[in-house]
Amino acid sequence: MEKLLTLTFLVVKALAQTSGPSRERTARATPGPPRSPEPGNRSPGSHAHVSRPTASRCVKVETGAAVTGTDERRTSRVRRDDIQGLRAVAVLVVVAYHAGAPFVPGGFVGVDLFFVLSGFLITQLLLREITITGTVSLRQFWARRARRILPVSALVLVSTMLAVRVFMSPLDRPAIGRDVVWSALFSGNWRFALQQTDYLAAERDPSPVLHYWSLGVEEQFYLVWPLLLLALAAGWRLAGRAGSVRARLLVLAFVTVIAVSFTYCLHLSTTDQPFAYFGTPARAWQLAAGALVAVAVPVISSWRPGTRTGLGVVGLALLGASVAILDESGVAGLTYPSWLAVAPTLAGMLLVTAGTGSAGPLGRALAIRPLPWIGDLSFSLYLWHWPVLVIGMAALDSRSPTTRAALVAVAVGLSVASFHVVETPMRHARLLVRRPVLSIAVGACLVAAVLPVAAYASQTGSIDRLTVTGMDGTTPRGAAAQETVRPPLADAADDQGPFKQHGCHVGFAQVVVPSWDACTFGRRGSDREVVVLGDSIAGAIAPAVLTAGERRGWAVTVWAKSSCPMADVTRFDPARGGTYEECDAFREAALRAIEKRRPDVVVIAMSRLTTEWLEADGRRLGKRASVDHAIEGMVRTVERLHATGIGVVLSDSPNRAPFFPTSCLAETRDARQCTFHRNGKTSIMAETSRAMGDDAVLVRANATACPQDICHPVVDNVVVYRDKVHFTQTFARTLADRFAAGVARATRH
């Protein structure tokens, strides 16, 4: 960050001494996370008419007020192969990361590099247009974006959706279809951010269009960015400001965007990490950082080649360190992006700086074949590689390195084909180039074409006939046969209690305990009051307690908070990037309300996962220490309730499946192929019960589905799981007698 501020100061100082037209070394290339060459750019081997080309094909041209339209058209044919090389590096590390290569844990920062390159290149185009015409043609700008992005983007989305229908589980289709629609509208980043903050939605396997989030960020940014430059240009014309004043105002505007966006990014990284990662406002500073380098081109071009090369070496080291060290889950207590994103962003700025002006050794290295060729393909390769990997591994049921390598090769082949057959012809289509409105209209039609395909391919019928083996809960009852199961598989994901609708199962941010009356079910006013308390697992087993209460005339109150253990512990939430203070506040408020109300029994349930990231005395605990700490914390919670005369029932957590059982059932139609082994992890509730002896009542809710070492996805024709870890409401109700017995024992205590 200090280097960034220093560079900004030097830019302002140098530009303040510059007025009127300036000579600079510049070039024309494409923006990107990742993009193909802009219309007019020549592919490798083309014969652009330029003067005195360098090794990286940077051409010395006039870009000041004296530049004519002819000069602009000529410079638009010049490209910087060093930037194409950077785009190649960026897409290669992203693909390697997604393919599971072991040496690139931080390969995801390739997207950060794309943001910087995009901000630099797009802003350079806009500034050149302002210099020549005094304004920005929004129609031309958005027409160019439409020709460049929408044809391949729509092709990949349509192909992905059709492949999902053929190769993936029918139960995956509706959610992926919604992902595709959001991505087609360049809003996918917001959908994925919302899913990551929804505990249950976050259980989904990665979407095959998850990578479209970066396109959403860029296109939302470029709806606003040209408007900002247009407003600045209009102000200059009215005020008749000199070139030096214009430059300083640009730097001030860009630095302001960087400062505001980066500050917001830091804030969200500690309070709502998914929105820091996927959100446009929290990522805008990276695009603006590239734009700042574009403003600095006249100054950078005057620097000594050795200075630029030295900065490039520093940038290369920062990028290498980012790829080798960073992790999406965070490093050294920091989540991504936060301060960690400064390294790849600054690396991009320095590497672009190194190639500005006359070609240096780093620029020549980045221009070595085949890097520029890969850079040309980078947009197509970025779009194709992820759905090919996700769908291919699902279809082949293999994640081996050989499978991944073969799928990457398939993605490269698709990229080459789409680049030559779709991307380049559409980008250079004369009719579209001459008619910007038509370009925009064709782009809108391409987006619209995705929607009916997504609707068709998302359809799934009712799947309720499966081959099952009858069970009485512990032993087989008969031979395998086709049976009707309930709920139908297509409905299983939504087969849960009404607790969220009533405001009884609250999200991450809420600390206020829900209304007692609104969250009380069964026979209100009964002389037997039972409370179900915990995280989402409590919401999953609550229908069992509710059914027991309906049969016996209890009043049952349900309070649940996502990912919040009721053990007296403090949890670090990696998904949100900090200590889960809201959980501590909610737990304390709930326990105080319960102590004041004094119900007969409290049934506590929580996921084993919520106790794997605990803190104590300001430090993060390891997994084994977290388990011990969680057991001690649960003992304290039970003893606290016992101290007021309240009985306590502990419910163990459902055994987490290594895959989605419902998806397996939908694909195979055979429950025998979808069994799995117990994971063998320590049960916090069982260990608490063992530690407290007769003072703690344990209900083994998991015993019916996992009677021995094997867990079954269907028991007595009832689908057990609605995702990987939560019971369906229908199955939970079959456990009513278990919980009734537990409540009876706790009452006697």
Image (cartoon, grey):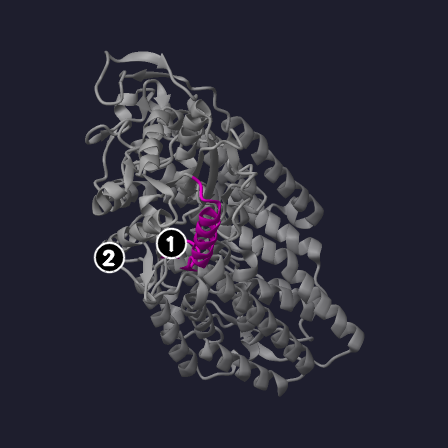
In the rendered image, residue 665, in percent from the top left (x then y), is placed at 34, 24
User: Looking at the image, is mark 1 or mark 2 nearer the viewer?
Assistant: 2
Q: Are marks 1 and 2 in contact (CB under 8 Å)?
A: no
What residue is pinned by disc 1?
Answer: 94
Is residue 593 one of those drawn in magenta? yes
Under tag 1, what secondary structure? helix
Q: Nearer the viewer, residue 672 or 414?
A: 672
Q: Image height check: is 81 above or below 683?
A: below
Residue 221 appears in the figure = yes
- Identify the image quadrant of residue 429: top right
Is residue 229 one of those drawn in magenta? no
Q: Nearer the viewer, residue 536 or 181?
A: 536
What residue is pinned by disc 2?
Answer: 625
As drawn, the label of residue 188 is none
> For mark 1, does the 10 Å Cα neighbourhood hold few (<14), some (14 to 19), or many (20 or more) residues?
many
- Mark 1 and mark 2: Cα distance apart in space: 35 Å
Q: Which residues are magenta?
A: 570-599
